[in-house]
């Protein structure tokens, strides 16, 4: 049997020099390949999820149970331990921040280790870096989707009604993803060259969480510090999530802020993507 | 390896050269006395030997000039020659020196005879006079025959050295040919036929000529050299030896551009062999050579070549066009060719075949411990030392090629394959590939927690197949791996044999055109091995180009069209798999 989908129509011409590997192929071939890469990445993530639930009685259900248990723990702390007034509203505010921050934190903290672990493994097998990046991204997006299901469930349980404004979360999540992935790829290069950086990033991300309005509102920041505070992209992302989910609105300031963050992150991602591919060819000299 | 300073030295002045004419004439006589072949000798070859024969006493200078230089030689360039009479005289005067424990050559009639018993050695050193600066160009011309005692029973080599440096082996003599710089195999005339071997080093480039025909040019180990060492050693009880009829050391910008840069005998011989070998691009190369010199092929070459290639559809137009061109039967109409019966067959626009994989002078340099950055190193010894794990590999693979790669552990076989998929950066050279190669290794991409079925899906996805295609292939892969009862168990619970069977089955089911198999062929037990062979035959038929890294000879010799032998990263040999296997055996022993 001869299956032809492994080919891309016109045969690509690959040139490898000490500077790197370049591939000459038509636009049609490139498009078909990108489409195949996405399908492939989804399937591989699916298998990865199955692999992670190996030996568990509840299997993949744990991907839903984990955020649910986390939410339950926070709710218990606020209502039973601290006996907080208006615990439902406070809990919703906290849990929204934590849900979205977790994706960012996981992506960024894994960045310094990406090229030396998963990336290198893919490169060594001749599979290229693109599938590894796509898999990482899709895996995190799927986990975020599962966390959002849990978040939605809790919000509805405590009296919030689903709103059409929630659909506007998609562009905000896209902006956050662009931002996180640009950092991820940048840190991947730095982390391969300077492995010690991986030890620091976790602490920096932890500090960053407290410097972001996930647990408190922007109103608590003094005016004199607001200019500096606004340099943090999450100063726009977090309030956007809170506004959209809790109030069904999106203020102009936060919308514009997200737009700027999105454009800058997109540019940074393009640069980082190019650089990481260039760097990955010589990765063996750093692993 | 001995140091250059210990070498015996032979330094001749021009007067010594005169008596060498007789030996040169004997070369010509020897060739002329050979039974006429169907091909005969070309006028150019005969002209060369006539020039050799004309180099008589008293007329040698003119003769040598004609023989070794196409252009007038600079008067200042000193031409030095070694001839047996001169060698004898030089030995008596102390200019000739034999290394410690070495057996001196015997001056025997018109030649210099070297005959060695077990563990004996003879070294002839051709060195520039001490007063002479290292010239830009230094040539050694040898007219000789040699009698190998057996493939692995002797070590006959020509080495070069520069100043007081170590020696580098340039040429190693093998039965039926020579290996140049551990990279290229060049065929020699068979039997006792004398031949003239010219080796020149000029500005970092080494050139080899055989019987006046330029055969190959490669990068030399030195920019310029001080001299040559002709080194013969016996490695067994059987006697081996060589007979040197004449030798010449030549300096300056001289080139052995005599004859007419053609050697139809070699080319036609090569073509005759290659027509039978089925290696299509070798045939093409031979045709190219013939076409370049405007040779007219005799019918006994054209007939079998065309008949043999009738089945080789992809190459037929190109080969036929070259045949037509070489045969000189067609005027103007490129793309026409003589058919088997001699009639002219019109072919569509012929294009020369291009290699599918072209590797040019590829080297890989790696750090011994790239991650050793600690301020306080825990180990001892040097940190992060650069190592050349592949050194100057050049080869081309054409459609239909199955290329074996032999070498000991750490020879650079897997590293070379990794360079082809971009998994290992090259430090020099260039690789061009038409198509997308896929590297298949034991265990690559297998997830221990996934079942065999899920791993098949995963491997297929990695290799760019659609899920539907993988599902279609799945039953055949499972059946071939004989894992019907275990395919839904996690991979981690498989035995080693089951794992290797599954991996082999997946790897060989993939429909890629360029496959790189890294030690995949030893899967399963004896019963499974029989299936492996059958399966591989199908893979060979399906793939455009197959690279196979393997330690065993069976597959290399029986299935490969060519073989590369690597030793510590250096390409030792590339060519006929039989010879490659012998070269590898010799290396291992």
Image (cartoon, rainbow, N blue to C red):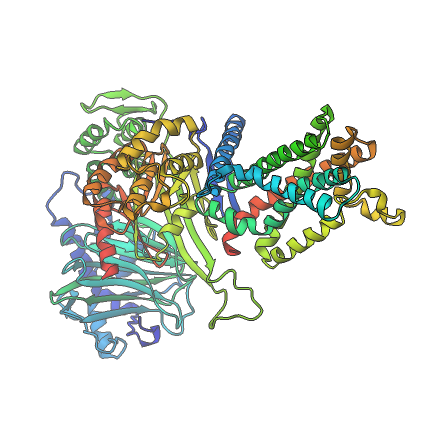
Q: Nearer the viewer, residue B380 or B284?
A: B380
- Residue B351 image position (x, y, % from top left): 37, 29
Instruction: Please state which of residues A214 and B300 is positioned toward the viewer in this rendering.
Output: A214
Residue B499, above or below B84:
above
Q: Residue, x 18% and y 31% (percent of image)?
A: B304
Is residue B408 among what the camera can see? yes
Write the residue at 69% across / 54% down: A204
Residue B58 seen in the current view: no
The answer to whether residue B446 is left or right of residue A74 is: left
- In the image, residue A208 lies at what x, y percent? 72, 50
Give x and y (percent) for residue B394. 38, 48
Residue B43 drawn at (x, y percent): 23, 42
Q: Quadrant of the N terminus of chain A?
A: top left
Q: Does residue B540 appear to the left or right of B461 in the view shown?
A: left
| Residue at x 78% of width, y 37% of height | A257
Quick one: B310 or B553, which is closer to the camera? B553
Q: Quadrant of residue B159?
A: bottom left
């Amino acid at each position: 049997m001869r299956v032809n989908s492994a080919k891309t129509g016109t045969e690509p011409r690959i040139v490898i020099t000490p500077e790197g590997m370049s591939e000459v192929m038509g636009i049609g071939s490139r498009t078909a390949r990108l489409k195949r890469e996405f399908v492939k990445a989804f399937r591989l993530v699916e298998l990865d999820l199955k692999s992670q639930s190996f030996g568990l009685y509840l299997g993949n259900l744990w991907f839903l149970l984990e955020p649910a248990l986390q939410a339950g723990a926070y709710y218990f702390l606020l209502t039973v331990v601290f006996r907080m007034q208006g615990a439902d509203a406070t809990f919703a505010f906290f849990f929204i921040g934590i849900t979205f921050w977790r994706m960012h934190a996981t992506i960024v903290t894994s960045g310094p280790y990406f090229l030396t672990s998963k990336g290198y493994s893919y490169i060594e097998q001749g599979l290229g870096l693109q599938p590894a990046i796509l898999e990482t991204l899709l895996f995190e997006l799927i986990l975020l989707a599962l966390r959002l299901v849990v978040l939605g469930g809790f919000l509805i349980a405590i009296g919030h009604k689903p709103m059409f404004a929630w659909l506007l979360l998609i562009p905000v999540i896209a902006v956050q993803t662009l931002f996180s992935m640009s950092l991820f790829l940048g840190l991947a290069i730095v982390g391969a060259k300077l492995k010690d950086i991986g030890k620091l990033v976790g602490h920096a991300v932890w500090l960053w969480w407290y410097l972001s309005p996930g647990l408190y509102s922007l109103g608590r920041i003094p005016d004199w510090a607001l200019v500096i505070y606004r340099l943090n992209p999450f100063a726009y992302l977090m309030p956007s999530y809170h506004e959209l989910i809790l109030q069904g609105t999106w203020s102009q300031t936060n919308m514009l802020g997200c737009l700027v963050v999105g454009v800058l992150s997109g540019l940074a991602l393009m640069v980082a993507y190019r650089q990481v591919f260039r760097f990955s060819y010589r990765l063996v000299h750093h692993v | 390896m001995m140091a250059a300073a210990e070498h015996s030295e032979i330094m001749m002045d021009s007067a010594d050269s005169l008596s060498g004419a007789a030996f040169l004439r004997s070369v010509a006589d020897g060739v002329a006395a050979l039974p006429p072949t169907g091909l005969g000798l070309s006028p150019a070859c005969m002209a060369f030997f006539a020039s050799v024969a004309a180099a008589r006493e008293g007329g040698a200078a003119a003769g040598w000039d004609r023989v070794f230089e196409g252009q007038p030689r600079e008067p200042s360039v000193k031409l030095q020659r070694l001839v047996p009479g001169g060698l004898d005289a030089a030995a008596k005067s102390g200019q000739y020196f034999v290394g410690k424990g070495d057996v001196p050559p015997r001056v025997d009639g018109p030649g210099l005879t070297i005959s060695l018993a077990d563990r004996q050695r003879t070294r002839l050193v051709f060195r520039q006079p001490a007063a002479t600066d290292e010239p830009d160009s230094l040539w050694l011309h040898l007219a000789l025959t040699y009698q190998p005692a057996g493939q692995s029973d002797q070590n006959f080599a020509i080495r070069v050295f520069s100043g007081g440096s170590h020696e580098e082996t340039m040429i190693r003599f093998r039965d039926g040919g020579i290996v140049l710089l551990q990279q290229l195999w060049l065929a020699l005339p068979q039997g006792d036929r004398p031949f003239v071997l010219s080796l020149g080093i000029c500005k970092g480039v080494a050139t080899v000529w055989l019987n006046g025909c330029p055969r190959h040019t490669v990068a030399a180990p030195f920019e310029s050299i001080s001299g040559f060492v002709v080194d013969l050693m016996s490695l067994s009880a059987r006697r081996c030896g060589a007979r040197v009829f004449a030798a010449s050391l030549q300096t300056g910008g001289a080139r052995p551009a005599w004859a007419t840069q053609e050697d139809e005998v070699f080319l036609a011989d090569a073509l005759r062999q290659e027509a039978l070998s089925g290696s299509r691009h070798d045939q093409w190369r031979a045709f190219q050579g013939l076409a370049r010199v405007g040779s007219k092929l005799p019918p006994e070459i054209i007939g079998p070549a065309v008949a043999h290639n009738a089945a080789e559809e992809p190459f037929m137009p190109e080969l036929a066009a070259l045949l037509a061109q070489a045969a000189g039967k067609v005027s103007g109409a490129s793309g026409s060719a003589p058919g088997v019966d001699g009639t002219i067959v019109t072919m569509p626009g012929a294009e020369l075949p291009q290699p599918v994989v072209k590797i040019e002078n590829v080297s890989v340099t790696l750090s011994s411990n790239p991650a050793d950055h600690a301020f306080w190193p825990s180990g001892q010894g040097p940190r992060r030392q650069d190592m050349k794990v592949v050194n100057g590999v050049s080869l081309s693979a054409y459609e239909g090629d199955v290329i074996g790669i032999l070498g000991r552990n750490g020879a650079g076989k897997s590293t070379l394959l990794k360079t082809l998929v971009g998994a290992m950066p090259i430090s020099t050279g260039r690789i061009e590939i038409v198509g997308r190669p896929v590297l298949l290794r034991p265990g690559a991409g297998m997830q221990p927690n996934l079942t065999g079925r899920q791993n098949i899906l995963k491997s297929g996805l990695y290799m760019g197949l659609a899920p539907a295609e993988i599902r279609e292939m799945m039953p055949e892969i499972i059946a071939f791996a004989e894992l019907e009862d275990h395919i839904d168990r996690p991979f981690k619970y498989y035995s080693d044999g089951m794992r290797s069977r599954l991996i082999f089955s997946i790897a060989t089911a993939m429909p890629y055109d360029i496959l790189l198999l890294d030690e995949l062929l030893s899967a399963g037990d004896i019963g499974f091995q029989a299936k492996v062979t059958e399966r591989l035959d199908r893979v060979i038929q399906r793939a455009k180009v197959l690279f196979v890294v393997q330690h065993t000879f069976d597959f290399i010799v029986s299935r490969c069209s060519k073989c590369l032998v690597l030793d510590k990263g250096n390409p030792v040999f590339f060519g006929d798999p039989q010879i490659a296997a012998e070269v590898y055996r010799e290396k291992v022993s």
